[in-house]
Image: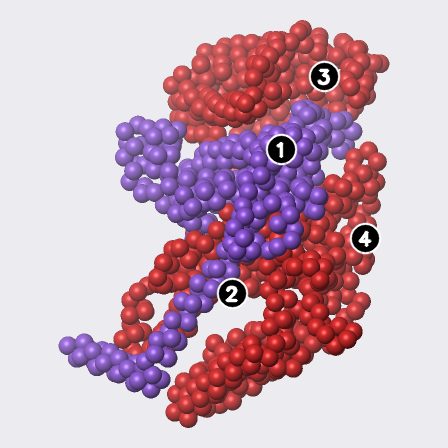
Amino acid sequence: MERILTSVAAIVLALVGSAGLFVGANKLFDLAPRKWTWFTTGVGAVVGFHAMAILWANRVVESLGVLSIPAPDIILVEVIGVDIPVIAVLGGLIGGAAGYVLSITRDPIQRIGIGVGGGAAIAVLIGLFVRTDDAVTEDDVFPPVLPELDFAALVLWTVIGAAVGAVIAYGLKALAGRQKDPIRTIVLWASLGFLAGGWLMADLGPDGSRVEAVIASLGVGIGLGAWIGMRRYPELEAREEVSRKARVWIFLGPALGFIAATLVIPLLRTLWLSFFRGPPRRDGEFAWLENYQDIFTDEGIINVSNWSNIFTSRLFWGGLLLVVAGLAVARILGRRTGHAIEASPSTLGTMGLGGFLLGFAIFTVLRGTIINNLWWVFTVTTLATGLGLAIAVLADRAKYENVAKSLIFMPMAISFVGAGIIWRFMYIARPPQDTQTGLLNAAWVGLGKLSNSTGPKLIALVILALAIAFLVYLGLRAYRTGEGNSVAAGAALTILPLLWLAWKIAFPGLGGFVEGPNGETVADTVIFLSNSPFNNVWLMVVLIWVQTGFAMVIFSAAIKAVPSELLEAAKVDGATESQTFWRITIPQILPTVGVVVTTLVVVVLKVFDIVKVMTNGNFDTQVIANEMWQRAFTELNFGLGSALAIILFIFVLPIMYLNVKRMQEAS
Amino acid sequence: MTTTRASAEQLQAAAATQTSLERGLGKRLYGFLKSIPTWVLWLLVILWTIPTFSLFVNSFRTRDLQRTTGFWEAFVDWDFTLANYEEVLGSGATGGVWEGLLNALAIAIPATVIPIFIAAFAAYAFAWMDFRGREWLFIATVSLLAIPAQVALIPLLQVFSSGAHLTLPVFDKTVTLMPDLNLSGKTIAVWLTHTGFALPFAIFLLHNYISGLPSSVFESARIDGADHFQIFMRLVLPLSIPVLAAFAIFQFLWTYNDYLIALTMIGSSGSNLPVTVRIASLAGEFGLREHILAAGAFISTVLPIAVFFALQRYFVRGILAGSIKG
């Protein structure tokens, strides 16, 4: 109960806090056009407060004390209790005062004076409270931060800063015609140069003195103060401009900030880490591309040494046969109608199936994490897209269409972890002499028993024979009448797998059994999850099971979006249903195929949960995401883990490019 | 006039071929063939449902039954028990599934609500505010939606466990950008990460909708003196409720079901683990407590499935808006 309260409180606080910040920022900038005094005072206070608070948090200055706002009892989230350093409050007061005075002063010289005064006050405050003792924390001791000034360096850096400012100011004026006060830009950059010379370049430590600290901060404070004070008093139009411009960034700020903090900067840092060897930070050693070299020479990650086995695999020759058969039929039929090839569903389907088998032939021989991941992409994308399209078509205008679609779509609501567990129950393999409790093995062993008894065998063969005879009749009829070329091709090409099935049933037998030592039949189970390489396919099935629903929903909407005038026009012109489908519906939803495929490719490339839960990459089932996770978070090899993450990112880049192109076309 | 007659004739011709086909094959056979697609469809539906269904049935069977017979035998023997649920929900050594459910909600709710607002601000700015580089910035933001989470995990975990420190290259001084707030292992680390990762997609989805709102609404409001903030709060948010709901459901299911980010940011032990991580570690010891695994897995899926069936329309709308318009 307390945990629930805690979480609810944390959530509400986070929400109220961020909403308050957003509304507050909006209200503050609402003040700019009409109530300029309030606005500048507020901005001055906020800037002064944050400047000091950041310095305090970085242990540059000490505070006079800390106003602690303790966390209420029910909130265990420690972040929510806040410490407000008194020095930041002082900074806020000075900033607010300077802002107030600036807002009521129009004389340019006086304005500069006020800016310099405010800046100097904050600088003195920093100098007075700069930390002179060791700061001791749990893990570390931080020496004092007194600067040892080197005046030559100070002057040099200030001059460099001023020079940079001059180049920028006059350069922009010459190139972009920007009409801004160049002196202001020079002052800004000179004070940044002073900051570099006084604080960043100087040795910080116990050897400096407080006086030097005051000098080092005074230069910066006076410079920045002057920069602010040199701004001319803004008239109403300029104030409205301030409010308008700031509004954009108030609306965009939270989103861009979050994206930068959780995606862009971490991405860059991952890239950076991928060049380091060993554990991160202190022990890491810059090693150029050695991590990548390791990856590409690791037999576990890319292994193509057995490539010649491709040509001895049955998958390869079977696939080749199908492609050749499909091509041959298409060519023969095409000659009759005067096309180079007859592109009908059956010929294309046969060639597609052949291509699919060829892909399998390659991916079962070339192994390793990366190639295995590509196999996932190849298989899951193809099958989920194909099945999704098929189901969308079958369900379209069927009775209880919505029920069927919901049930197919439901796995999308289940976590990958849950899906993995569900399928582990399906894949259970018990010792052959025991009862099989997994559905698939029970069915497979049952099938083996059936195909060893004469009755069912005969029935199956008779049904197959009837089907084949029917197809022969259909094909011949379509061929003789000269119409329905595609029907003939379809019949011819469907007979092939039926013949294969008949042969399989009649002679070697179908299903899970082997011949025992005495000629008796013994049950033979499929060890789904540990027999490589096909265990990968069984893992892919889980993702296909989940993602087919996604593809189906999108295709279903696309099919329903095909303009009905087109379909009616086709019907009026005497097109059959299948002609309408292949010649109108399919071309109409082709762009959708692109969307589905790109989305699926990204999902499959990132596949992690299923593999982690079902095999954890054992038995030759590793994928990039899991390899990355193991290297980074089990072995704590952040360099190699980062390199693997970057490889994953590189695989996604083409998809990102396609997405951007599509978005540009849409707008 | 002539065209109408021509098309009528064609219609008749088409009908004639169809009837001849029917007569040629025999009405019954033709009817059977016509119903094949429906049969195939329902066969697929059954195939798709069996895995979940079998888990459901198994979760009500005793350990011994689960180990010796398949789930289908339950309908022959009719032997069910609630013991697995009692064990898995009971506190103590069984993995704390109940606590896991609460933790999953503590992650999923803020990770759903917060990105909605942040993304709505940004989507509104991209759609209805004028500023330089708008197109460019929008495309850059949205292109990030395909980025795999893996590229950000290592740095984010470092930030959550030890803060962010930047060492300035020339000056060799380290500046603390974010102090060590000791967030790793806490749910807040998970939902902060989810919030960031969700934004590109959320902005994309909401922008599609918000940019399609009629501009006349905004113009009349602006004439009445409303500024962007008022327009956003009083007009845009109420008008966008359908798309906000669509994204909310999508994001809720995604974050509730997430495993990778929770596992990385929280680890695999401790009291903050969401249900997915707990169930996964139950699965890791397959054999020991496999009898409660089905019950645990089923409990973890009850909420998302209920949300899914109750609000399916919004969920589908979210998926469609996120893909087709792109």
Q: Report the Cα–Cα distance between label 1 and label 3.
A: 46 Å
Q: Which residue is mark 4?
A: A294
**Of tags 1 and 4, which is closer to the observer?**
1
Residue A60, labelled with which disc? 3
Q: Quadrant of residue B20?
A: bottom left
Q: Say which element carries label 1.
A: loop
Left or right? Give the position of A515 relative to A449: right
Q: Which residue is mark 1?
A: B96
Q: Report the Cα–Cα distance between label 2 and label 4.
A: 37 Å
Q: Which residue is mark 2?
A: A386
What is the chain letter for disc 1? B
Q: Say which element carries label 4.
A: helix
Query: Do tag 2 and tag 1 residues touch (Cβ < 8 Å)?
Result: no
Q: Say which element carries label 2.
A: helix
The answer, for residue A223, to whether it is visible in the render is no
Q: Amino acid at mark 1?
A: Gly
Q: Position of residue A102 (x, y in %)?
A: 50, 13
Which chain: purple?
B
Which residue occupies 78% across, 54% down?
A295
**Of tags 2 and 3, which is closer to the observer?**
2
Query: Do tag 4 and tag 3 residues touch (Cβ < 8 Å)?
Result: no
Q: Quadrant of residue B27?
A: bottom left
Which residue occupies 53% across, 33% down?
B105
Nearer-N-terminus badge (2/4):
4
Left or right? Give the position of B235 relative to A126: left
Query: Do tag 2 and tag 3 residues touch (Cβ < 8 Å)?
Result: no
Nearer-N-terminus badge (4/3):
3
Q: Amino acid at mark 3?
A: Val
The answer, for residue B229, to whether it is visible in the render is yes
For residue A615, above or below residue B9: above
What is the chain letter for disc 2? A
Which quadrant is the N terminus of chain A positioned in?
top right
